[in-house]
Image (tube, grey):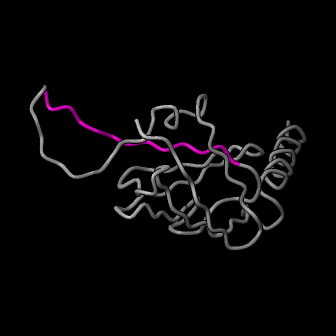
Amino acid sequence: MKRFRYLQFLFCGIAVLFVTGCSGKTPTYPVKGTVSFEDGSPVMFGTIELLSTERPINARGTIDREGNFVLSTFKEGDGAVAGKHQCVITQMVVDYYGVQVEHDHGDLVAEKYSRYSTTDLEVVVETQANQVKLVVDKK
């Protein structure tokens, strides 16, 4: 029984090293960018998320009123893992039971960008500092 537990422990350790690399941490690279509409106006709010097509790791960031964002994976502002990523943009708009609410959040992005199954946005993260410019359709 001891030998079986030893082999289990050894296998788990090897699996962890395989997934995370020898350093124990998957490297990330800085990613900053902008999101705008085709007419050049900024997307003024929301969240952007990248999902690596090679690993089950995502990065996310908040879009500010000028359309800027900074991505984080493991800690604030550390960026994303290298490689190709699918990209989604989500915006939460609350309907207060039909009550007209005054707001200034600009235009909304098309719904196709809110799901990985329908988005056509892709980002390639290089092993260096990355500057991304995304252009999206309005809803």
Q: Quadrant of the C terminus?
A: top left
Q: Is residue 92 left or right of residue 23?
A: left
- Relative to residue 38, is residue 119 depicted above or below? above
Report the residue at 50% width, 67% height from top: 76
Q: Quadrant of the N terminus?
A: top right
Report the residue at 83% width, 47% height from top: 15
Query: Outermost residue toward the bottom?
Result: 129
Residue 18 belongs to magenta span: no
Task: Please state the extent of the stretch shown in magenta in the rendering.
Answer: 85-97
Looking at the image, which is closer to me, 119 or 81?
119
- Relative to residue 133, is residue 136 depicted above or below? above
Q: In which quadrant of the rendered view does residue 91 lie?
A: top left
Report the residue at 72% width, 55% height from top: 124
Query: Outermost residue toward the front?
Result: 39
- Relative to residue 129, is residue 64 depicted above or below? above
In the image, residue 22 lies at what x, y percent? 84, 64
In the image, residue 26 lies at what x, y percent? 73, 61
Looking at the image, which is closer to me, 57 or 110?
110
Q: Is residue 3 left or right of residue 121?
A: right
Residue 87 belongs to magenta span: yes
In the image, residue 81 lies at what x, y percent? 70, 59
